[in-house]
Image (tube, helix red, strand yellow):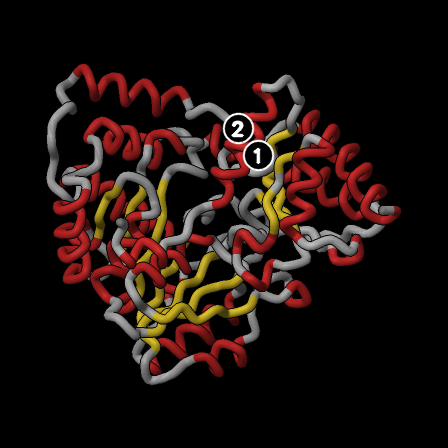
Amino acid sequence: MLAKRMQRLGTETAFEVLARAKALEAEGRDIVHLEIGEPDFDTPANIIDKAVEALRSGYTHYGPAAGLPEVRKVFAAHIARDRGIDVGPEHVVITPGGKPIIYFPLTALVDPGDEVIYPNPGFPIYESVINFLDGKAVPLQLAEAKDFCFDIDDLRALITAKTKLLIINSPQNPTGGVLGAADLDAIAELAVKHDFWVLSDEIYSKIVYAGSHESIATRPGMLERTIILDGHSKTYAMTGWRLGYGIMPKELAAAVAKLQTNCTSCTAAFTQIAGAEALTGPQDAARAMVAEFKARRDLLVDGLNAIEGISCRQPRGAFYVFPNIGALGLGSKQAEQRLLEDHGVAALAGTSFGRFGEGYLRFSYANSQANLRKALVRIAEFAAAARHG
């Protein structure tokens, strides 16, 4: 019999849909994959070459739980320069992927009954971890009318004496929404006033299509109460390398490193060396990838808005669209199933990202323009069948 806490643990539906799609492909079906949040580009060659060099140079052993000192130094220098904040290696913890920077800091900070406010629709692991830790998950609705940002008054109304932490994600999964400077200013003011932490998920910080990314950690009083989550999976097409990191106050960093000692020991040494090369080496491949994502975004948004019964806002970052399908008269989960089984397009129900995602689907445009065009034809057929069915 499993422990009762397992009943509180959620999952990431993208991998379940991927498995169903792969099963259909094994039966001979042609499936367009728009479900998984993974760049379809190869890791840049300079990063691969550096990893191979590291392996041949002996980076095949255990390292410190918080990360190799020379790599923590590189990561800290990158964040200090990129975000304009005063951090050093002692603020950095390097982890196998970005999810540990959700799980470990929340484990270190959240006691049973503590309230954690999180974006909804949002990355499902936020709510899953809060519930698993026996915290109280408090959803903050992201509104389409506000380009999938949230109303500061709505946030203000959710804050109580038990609020321990707020999670923000900008650019955002699943909507592509981006928090503006005024939003960050207002959030920071509330965090300082009510003395709560902010976990700022900035994993898509380099995939912004207009302007530049801003971090809440730059606001007065926020550096000592902010955890920045970043990593290499999205910007450098390194999903399989499992490389993420957190920037946080050094006392919390020590606690997070202790948790890592107990869970994973450390992050693979050669992967860390490759990650340092990613940040310090040529950025041409990363910039080219973002430019291609922008072209795909425009293609997909225009195509979806041309389909009767579907409307789609233009995302400002990340590589997802979150179209409104309410006019089709189908629930999100039903739409997800019909699209896959009847029309060969793998997508995710908006409810995979929380209850406020009902009436929406999420498409990842981490796929070729040719496949996006094929998907649009099939989505139009799906919408026509729904309208007449």
Q: Tag 1's secondary structure?
A: loop
- Residue 233 in picture, x, y percent from top left: 40, 37
* Amino acid on which the number 2 mark rests in the picture: Asp
- Residue 16 in picture, x, y percent from top left: 49, 38
Residue pictured at 24% horizontal, 30% vertical: 273
Disc number placed over residue 40 in the picture, else none: 2
Residue 344 is drawn in which quadrant? top right
Is residue 60 rendered to the left or right of residue 10? left
Residue pictured at 81% horizontal, 46% vertical: 386
- Residue 76 in picture, x, y percent from top left: 25, 48
How far apart marks 2 and 1 lie (CA) works out to 6 Å
Is residue 90 rendered to the left or right of residue 135? left
Residue 225 is drawn in which quadrant? bottom left
Mark 2, other Cα within 10 Å: few <14 / some 14–19 / many ≥20 = few
Proximity of marks 2 and 1: CB atoms separated by less than 8 Å: yes
Q: Is residue 2 above or below residue 158?
A: above
- Residue 6 in picture, x, y percent from top left: 32, 53
Residue pictured at 70% horizontal, 38% vertical: 339
Is residue 131 rendered to the left or right of residue 145? left
Q: Which residue is mark 1?
A: 366
